[in-house]
């Protein structure tokens, strides 16, 4: 009986079940692109822009102040940053099809807990000798950890991982297409979620998100995800690659051949890994801090709520255009030049913060933060498989995501401390400018590892 159960379970995850990808009338990788894009969009409830719309509800049902809730959110995010590298190792071991189910179910469970926060806190307060404040703080920290771990962390990482496994020569193009939909989805998420809350209420909204983003992604992931084309009798990109030498010695050749597979232990010693990770983590820190305090930043600059929030529409438009352009360029130029563009645009946007009360400052913020958003989306997908191969991609992505999530956790505090001590955000803006100039200088030393013909 146990043997039959095991065989039945194995059958559920065979690449040929419930259909064979190689029998599709087109290259199956394009369908992976569709499902992976859905997976990235489904991570929104675990992203800051998703969690933020439920802040007022959580304040009303807990014993926490706004600052207490922010600290709980930070601790949950830091906890996720420490756990996500282990998720990356499991991704290498189990593959994207199993891990997307795990991520979807985990996100659904986290949203279920979020929906029942009030009842859960009341129940625990009856049983516990701890103060209601401590109970609320601990429980919400754990809920935030689950939301960040399964939403922002695993679901996003697994979806990017799937794209990287199925495309090589067209990876930049695919990243650009994916970025168009993800950028529009993320930029419109606050408005759409707020509309959903107005129509269904906080509790009803959480149920809908749990079903669509959690359970829906788990089911679609099982149905359509396949770990790699070779398992399905297919080639990456749908056709065998041409023989290529080391592209670093031939600038005119395509830039996106996959590198030699390197284990995490060697990657950790790579200057290139850390300079790219620091550049993208810098983006996470700055943009999360800026977004978290946007109302206060606008108030200090003399802008009302509608005026300061209006900058996000042009930022999203610029981000979409830049993402597609970056994807196209990533197939043709060394990635370190895109990293330079990323950190320079972060510095430009941060410099614009100093003059947000003037039109020129707002324009610099929109251009700088818009460009960095598009370039970040491209680099987060194409960099690691191109530099370090696919075999240990999960572990490498897990370490990268851990650093990025940690940076997003301290971003609000980084800006908040500046405002509390000096009364403005200028100090944090200047630190951001000089930090990215240093990373820009370091990017000159970044280089590919030795590539191989495949």
Image (cartoon, grey):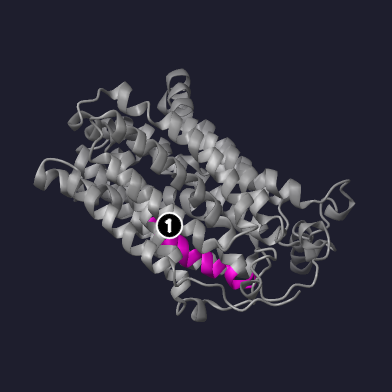
Taking the spot 23% from the left edge, 36% from the top edge, the residue there is 355
Q: The C terminus appears in which quarter of the rendering?
A: bottom right
| Residue 400 highlighted magenta (yes or no) | yes
Q: Nearer the viewer, residue 376 or 117?
A: 376
Q: Nearer the viewer, residue 365 or 100?
A: 365
Taking the spot 39% from the left edge, 36% from the top edge, the residue there is 366
Q: Is residue 113 above or below residue 161?
A: above
Q: Secondary structure at mark 1?
A: helix
Percent x, y of residue 121: 30, 41
Number of other residues with Cα within 10 Å of mark 1, as a class: few under 14, some 14 to 19, many 20 or more: many
Q: Is residue 314 above or below residue 145?
A: above
Per the rendered image, the range of residues in magenta is: 387-405
Percent x, y of residue 79: 36, 59
Q: Nearer the viewer, residue 267 or 213?
A: 267
Taking the spot 41% from the left edge, 27% from the top edge, the residue there is 202
State which quadrant residue 365 falls in.
top left
Q: Is residue 338 left or right of residue 123?
A: right
Mark 1 lies on residue:
280
Q: Residue at the far top: name it.
A: 199
């Amino acid at each position: 009986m146990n043997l039959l159960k095991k065989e039945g379970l194995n059958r559920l995850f065979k690449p040929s079940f419930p259909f064979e990808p190689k029998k599709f009338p087109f290259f199956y990788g394009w369908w992976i692109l569709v499902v992976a894009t859905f997976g990235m969009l489904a991570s929104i409830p675990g992203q800051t822009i998703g969690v933020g719309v439920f802040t007022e509800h959580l304040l009303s049902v807990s014993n926490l102040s706004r600052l207490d809730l922010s600290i709980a959110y930070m601790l949950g995010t830091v906890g996720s940053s420490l756990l996500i590298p282990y998720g990356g190792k499991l991704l290498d071991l189990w593959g994207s099809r199993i891990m997307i189910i795990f991520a979807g179910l985990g996100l659904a469970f986290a949203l279920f807990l979020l929906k029942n926060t009030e009842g859960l806190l009341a129940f625990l307060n009856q049983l516990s000798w701890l103060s209601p404040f401590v109970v609320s703080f601990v429980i919400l920290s754990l809920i935030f950890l689950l939301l960040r771990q399964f939403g922002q962390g695993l679901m996003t990482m697994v979806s990017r991982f799937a794209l990287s496994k199925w495309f090589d020569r067209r990876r930049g193009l695919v990243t650009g297409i994916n970025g168009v939909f993800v950028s529009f989805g993320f930029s419109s998420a606050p408005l759409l979620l707020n509309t959903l809350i107005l129509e269904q209420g906080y509790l009803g909204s959480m149920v809908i998100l749990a079903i669509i983003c959690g359970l829906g992604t788990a089911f679609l992931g099982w149905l359509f995800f396949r770990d790699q084309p070779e398992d399905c009798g297919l080639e990456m990109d749908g056709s065998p690659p041409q023989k290529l030498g080391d592209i670093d010695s031939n600038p005119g050749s395509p830039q996106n051949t996959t590198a030699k597979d390197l284990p995490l232990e060697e990657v950790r010693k790579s200057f290139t890994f850390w300079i790219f990770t620091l550049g993208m983590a810098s983006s996470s820190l700055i943009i999360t801090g800026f977004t978290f305090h946007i109302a206060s930043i606008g108030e200090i600059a003399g802008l009302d709520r509608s005026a300061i929030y209006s900058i996000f529409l042009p930022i999203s438009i610029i981000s979409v255009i830049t993402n597609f352009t970056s994807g196209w360029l990533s197939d043709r130029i060394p990635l370190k030049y895109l990293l330079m563009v990323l950190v320079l645009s972060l510095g430009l946007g941060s410099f614009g913060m100093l003059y947000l009360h003037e039109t020129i400052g707002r324009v610099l913020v929109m251009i700088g933060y818009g460009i960095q958003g598009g370039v970040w989306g491209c680099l987060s997908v194409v960099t690691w498989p191109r530099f370090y191969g696919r075999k240990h991609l999960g572990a490498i992505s897990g370490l990268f995501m851990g650093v990025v999530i940690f940076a997003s956790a301290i971003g609000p505090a980084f800006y908040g401390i500046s405002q509390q001590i000096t009364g403005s955000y200028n100090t944090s803006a200047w630190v951001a400018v000089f930090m990215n100039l240093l990373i820009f200088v370091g990017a000159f030393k970044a280089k590919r590892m030795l590539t191989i013909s495949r």
